[in-house]
Amino acid sequence: MLRYWGVSLLRQRGGSRHLVTTTAGSTQATDTSNREIPITLKPNTATKDSSYGSSRGSELLGIGGGLGFTPPDQEEEAVKEPPLYDSHIRTNAFQKAILTCGAAAAALLDPRRHDMVAVLGETTGSKALTRLYARMIDDPEGSRILVDKPRINSSTIDLDALRKLPTDSLGRMYIRFLEDNKVTPDSRLPVQFVDDPELAYVMQRYREGHDLFHTVLGMPTNMLGEVAVKWIEALQTGLPMCYGGAVFGPLRFRPKQRQKYVSVYLPWAIRVGRTARLLMNVYFEERWEQSIHDVRAEFGIEPPPV
Amino acid sequence: MWPAGRRMVSVVPRLAFAAARCTATASGHAKGEYSTDKETHFGFEHVSEEEKAQKVHKVFENVADKYDLMNDLMSGFVHRAWKDHFVSRLQPRPNTRLLDVAGGTGDIVFRYIQHLRYASLGARVGAAASPQHTTTTDSSTSDSSSSDSDSDSSQRLYEISVCDISESMLGVGRQRAEALGHRGIDWVCGDAQKLPFEEGEFDCYTIAFGIRNVVDVQKALDEAYRVLKPGGRFMCLEFSHVKNPLVRWAYDQYSLNVIPPMGQVVAGDWASYQYLVESIRKFPDQETFKEMIEEAGFRNVTYENLTLGVAAIHSGFKI
């Protein structure tokens, strides 16, 4: 029952920690003014009503939806609907379509446009994110992640402390991964186009956890490794953008890479993607000291091919 | 052509002005110009004047390197025709001093120079009084040899100042000028509400797609009046209001649904292009703007709609 209560209330209240831990009947539990969660319902300073639902008039006048322009007599009352979380940009279906086509074209033409891949993922991922959210809620560790909403960047993670951990630990392997591949946890863009704060967090977590998926799976960031991770992510999360990357990535392989891909990496990736536990449910922040082999065993991840 | 002494007198204090201003505020914005209490619009958002000044500056710092590309894409290259028409309406003449405000990347001034070059080309052809087809080749070769020095020779072809709030935009303009071989343009970082120029310095003041971004449009118009010589001309090219409801609906749909996503895809910046689209709607319509220009003191104020009112050219004289 907690599951159903949790789902509906989490979705309405943006996952406030207070609701899950406070007893029913306590009215303070619903006080949303002093929450400390990362995704805040930021009221737009321009509007007078900070409530979620806006009046019909402002819905009509909302930018990016409705009529698309302000009729002259209602101009003074034009208020934008507030964003659902920091960095949220409201978009209607037509704008999403343009973003999807444009981002796909830009990403294919210039593979360095990681921001376009990110946008593509956001505009096409709503169904997959909903299913993923439901699967995370079902799992005890996953639902804790959804309640706590931890973020992964250089200010939330003490990279120096991780460096001091034993060699085989998840934390130390993660640091080694970051250093070997010269990546930083701060390069992930904030989610902008997902129209639900909970799903936006799931997307953000996916994005920020990508490097940790690499670590747990033991895949490097070269083309082969990236495609393998994309396959596993596609099979686990169902995000269309992952399928796109997994299908279009190999088009740029050289013959030797393609041979290795077909004979070793692809079968491995499909096996792991199908049988392993959902990687999104790994609460990395609680497992820094755990040995990576234990993590792999616990989640049913086959060791990476050498 | 201008006596060297007179030029020095007007240039030196202005340059000192401009340098101090730009380093002090890290943008062209005049210090103390903007209040933190008075409310204005930033697109559809209500902000204080000071906030608007900062936000506008930030928008142009962000968009500078993709500015020209985005203009082409958003208007379907039509903005080039608008600017061509604007400069032809201006009827450039040699020995006139032009100030182009908010002219960062140089579109207007480069067209102005082109007009002057072609005009002088025509003059040489006419003066030679021989059949066209033989003289055009001669004058074209002589033109190309003198084009490098047309700004250096005693017979200066043009005297142009470009003023913009954003150093990044001016940087792009300088690069383009170098690539095109135009020298002698004065690139100045400054604020349209408080121009770093003396009274009565210019024969012509142009502002293309810039006055919409000014915090207090009336002040910018007053400044325009101030820096113009008596008889000087004010010309403004700006987005305006479309009267036809059907066309307006289509234009609004395009603006609000296509332009910000395009900004995200091409420049990675939705917010700046959302601001662009909203600021167009917040700008006064043709008649109201005409009245504002008249209020600044200009006479014979007229306007001409381009593309059914999507853009409009306003013109006024200081007489």
Image (cartoon, grey):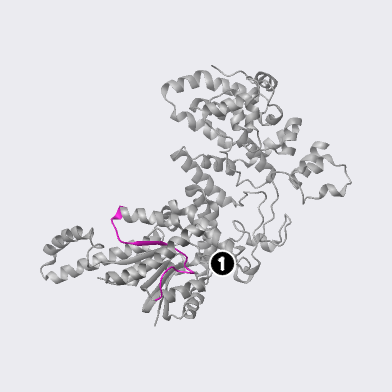
Q: Residue furthest right?
A: A25
| Up-down relation of residue B301 to residue B115 (above or below) | below
Q: Chain of mark 1?
A: B
In the rendered image, which residue does mark 1 sit on? B34
Q: Nearer the viewer, residue B2 or A250?
A: B2
Q: Nearer the viewer, residue A264 or B175?
A: B175
Magenta span: predominant SS is loop
> Does residue B289 appear to the left or right of A169 in the view shown?
left
- Looking at the rendering, which quadrant does residue B124 occupy? bottom left
| Amino acid found under the numbered disc labelled 1 | Tyr
**Is residue B196 rendered magenta in the image?**
yes
Q: Position of residue A85 (x, y in %)?
A: 67, 48
| Up-down relation of residue A169 to residue A111 (above or below) | above
Q: Nearer the viewer, residue A160 or A305?
A: A160
| Up-down relation of residue B25 to residue B122 (above or below) | above
Q: Nearer the viewer, residue A103 or A290?
A: A290
Residue at position x 55%, y 42% from top?
A: A120
Q: Position of residue B5 (x, y in %)?
A: 29, 70
Q: Position of residue B54 (x, y in %)?
A: 55, 59
Q: Position of residue B233 (x, y in %)?
A: 38, 76
Magenta stretch: give its range. Answer: B179-199
**Residue B263 showing in the rendered view:** yes
